[in-house]
Amino acid sequence: MVAMGLALILAAAAGARADEILYSAVTDVGQASQPLICGVAALQLAIASGPSTRAFGSELARSLAYTAAATEILKFATQQPRPDNRNAKDGFPSAHTSVAFAFAEALAAHDSHWTIPAYTLAAVVGYSRVQGRDHYPLQVLAGAALGYFVAKEVGRNKHWG
């Protein structure tokens, strides 16, 4: 549900048709997780017709891709357990939270009117990961920081990608 909210905010901020983005995200990836739905929305914006929307979509897609890659590298390197499954070694950092905060920062940098809603939804994602016992609070905070700083750097370095 949070992914759908993020996709709606993205569509509205970019001036795209939300129904087209959501329909494609749902039909293309089925019951996929939030990072995949956000990624599909970003890629659709990257190939959109307007140059401003394409630039935003490209920046968002790069932010999400770099964040996802950094998250997976850290998960592999740290091998931290999760609260609900001590045998799982993929707890650090929270991927859902890192992607949510990368999304929020990219959107806030694109249009400051969306800063509060985007960061509120990102915080809800992080909170839900702790409440659902999917991650420890430090894993969620690390994911939030990672997503934020990667998206901030991608925004500063437009030549990346």
Image (tube, rainbow, N blue to C red):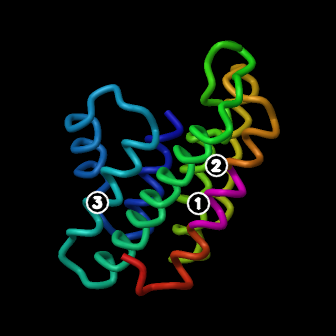
54 relative to 78, above or below: below
Q: Quadrant of residue 94?
A: top right
- How packed mark 1 is, by other alpha carbons closer than 10 Å (few <14, some 14-19, many 20 or more), is many
Closer to the chain start, of discs 3 and 2, is 3
Is 82 in front, or is 141? 82
Residue highlighted by disc 2? 122
| Residue 58 appears in view | yes
In the image, what residue occupies the spot 22% across and 51% down? 20
Amino acid of disc 1: Ala
- How packed mark 2 is, by other alpha carbons closer than 10 Å (few <14, some 14-19, many 20 or more), is many
| Residue 111 appears in view | no
Q: Residue furthest front?
A: 77
Amino acid of disc 2: Ala
- Left or right, 89 with reference to 44: right
Closer to the chain start, of discs 2 and 1, is 1
In the image, what residue occupies the spot 67% across and 48% down? 143
The local secondary structure at tag 2 comes to: helix
Q: CA distance from mark 3 to mark 2?
A: 20 Å
The local secondary structure at tag 3 comes to: helix
User: Do callouts 3 and 2 mark residues in contact (Cβ within 8 Å)?
Assistant: no
Residue highlighted by disc 3? 43
Instruction: Specify whether residue 145 is painted magenta.
Output: yes
- The stretch of residues the image draws in magenta is 144-150
95 relative to 79, above or below: below
Amino acid of disc 3: Leu
- Left or right, 120 with reference to 35: right
Is 114 in front, or is 78? 78
Residue highlighted by disc 1? 104
